[in-house]
Amino acid sequence: MRSYGNPFPKTCGKFLSKIHGKIWIDKVELEWIRVDAETIDTVSLGLVLFRLNKGASLQFEQARINDEIWLPRHIHVMGTGRVALLVSGGNSADIRYDNYKKFSADSRIVSTSEVR
């Protein structure tokens, strides 16, 4: 088996050790479908960029689009925290993704002569 290195940044382990929850996996594709989690300690991303306090709930869902690719469908975060040292207190974010459109492009080589 070929190893491509660790796909997660070093800080990911610190982040994941501070949450617990459930993950649903598609049996055929072996791809995650849904994650329900809760923070069991304060989670920080970046030095002062984002902070989520203990007890926050996190929900992530993704779906297979056009039988080709897995993309986000829904993200919901609810809890207390702080964003960039400016906004603090009870926060809730609900983001829905839909109406994905397939992008295609054509290309062709117009000349093979050397550029001088």
Image: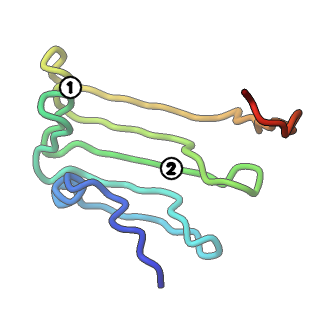
Give residue 47's position: percent from left, percent from top.
12, 33
In this view, 48 is above or below 52: above
The quadrant holding residue 48 is top left
Give residue 104's position: percent from left, percent from top.
80, 38
Give residue 53's position: percent from left, percent from top.
14, 39
The quadrant holding residue 97 is top right
Looking at the image, is mark 1 or mark 2 nearer the viewer?
Answer: 2
Which amino acid, mark 1?
Gly
The residue at 77%/38% (across/down) is: 102
Per the image, the residue denoted by label 2 is: 61
The residue at 16%/14% (across/down) is: 86
Residue at the outermost front position: 116
The reply, left or right, for residue 56 in relation to residue 22 is left
The residue at 27%/54% (across/down) is: 9
Per the image, the residue denoted by label 1 is: 90
In this view, 112 is above or below 66: above
